[in-house]
Image (cartoon, grey):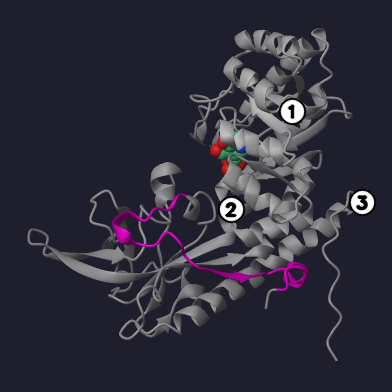
Amino acid sequence: TTPPTPPPPVLDASSSDLDLLRPINHGLTEAKRLISQALECRISTIDHDTCDVGDEDAFFVADLGEVYRQHLRWKLNLGRVKPHYAVKCNPDPQVLRLLAELGTGFDCASKAEMEQVLQMGIDPARIIYAQPCKTKSHLRYAAQNGVRQLTFDNADELYKTKQLLPDAELYLRILTDDSASLCPLSLKFGASLDNTRDLLELAHALGLNVVGVAFHIGSGASDPKAFLKAVQDARVVFDQAADLGFAMHTLDVGGGFCSDASFEDMAAVLSSALDCYFPPHIRIIGEPGRFYVSSAFTLACHVIARRTVNDPTLGTSSYMLYLNDGVYGNFSSIIFDHQNPVPRILRAGDRFLYAAHSSGYETPNMVDYSIWGPTCDGIDCIAQACSFPEVIQTGDWMYFEDMGAYTKCSATRFNGFTDKHSVVYVSSDPSVRALLQLE
Ligand code: PLP
């Protein structure tokens, strides 16, 4: 007889903190084991001497249990903030499916992102079109498909909205101090507090409905005080709006959250600022991207070529390794997202080294490497200097953890290499495995 299917994860407000923490702690070791198994299983099917073009391409292993754990972490620390996942960060269909099941909303930046989410049967009311400067045809698509929540930060956008989506629910995006973030956004978006009253007056004169304020403290933020200041500024704009007769009901605190231990500190500052400045009847939403997916994706690549570099003065050798993925591919995060992915050996010769990566590197015989992508461009460098206790050969495999955010979504086809890398899905959480019917 088939065992009964476990019920889908229950993530209602009544879950106690302890219930939420249990899968977080349990999933971590299970995740390592599953990822390792998935990597080995896939690589063992590849014969570099006989395979078809593309069979040996770089690939991801995605642990959807990790996405679920991040969701629990979010609920535990930011229970008041309803997440609207930023699709741009990683529009992976299984990630979107899981988040749809978990009840999150979605932050979309274009017609294609809205379409992807709507095609999953998601209610358009769960989407915020969070792009303050929209292409008209994309805005028409939003209007025709029932997406009504939009952000704006300038007068022209209000005229555009009046013409194409006059019953929109508008969020005024304000400027933030994003100087402590990896990817500042306020250079490009956000109205300063000097302009917000004028914009609200114009919206009022046009008969538009401004329902809230939005901000983003920059992607990969590191200063919790930026949240405090942004919440205080949002309060000022709520009060300006009330003076003009708008009954704002929602604050959108954007994204910017990292998945490392800084999250809990950021969340604590944000939560207490929200409780201080916004009474409980104000709805709070957020647009997290990297927080949900960054740690869930591991990328495996193989060494397509190796060059030996001799230093006659020192009498030493080092190696330049060329991988089948680079900054024009999934390592686009090095250029666009200012990341430094950490290379690790996955398979050297016949040995599978995943589980051993964190130990045994302190041997005296370290070998120096630089690591490069496959294109003809000199900028295509993944790591300028690293060392391993192994002599890595052509055909060996390497892997990189934390490759879920702003990686494959910004990969290109430069030099004719693929921008479509396959994903092996696993789940270190049994309820997610059942929910998504993963093997
Ligand atoms: N919302 C908006 C409007 C953004 O521009 C971005 C990222 O650029 C995000 C959300 C997601 O940010 P993060 O991945 O830092 O959470």
Tell me which label, 3 or 1, sits earlier in the chain: 3
Q: Which residues are magenta?
A: 410-437
In the picture, measured across the screen, residue 56 lies left or right of residue 287, that is left
Say which quarter of the image contains residue 293. bottom right
Tell which tag, 1 or 2, sits nearer the viewer. Answer: 1
Q: Name the amino acid type tagged 3.
A: Ser
Q: How far across and down, in percent of the image, does residue 2 sit?
A: 83, 87
Vertical side of 154 occupied by 126: above or below: below
Q: Residues within 10 Å of mark 2 (few under 14, many from 20)?
A: many
Residue closest to the eye, 328 or 231: 328
In the picture, measured across the screen, residue 19 lies left or right of residue 64, that is right
Query: What is the C-alpha distance between the residues marked 2 and 3?
Result: 30 Å
Tell me which label, 1 or 2, sits earlier in the chain: 2
Q: Residues within 10 Å of mark 1 (few under 14, many from 20)?
A: many
- Res 373 seen here: no
Point 72% across, 55% down: residue: 99
Residue placed under numbered mark 3 in the picture: 14
Q: Secondary structure at mark 1?
A: loop
Residue placed under numbered mark 2 in the picture: 91
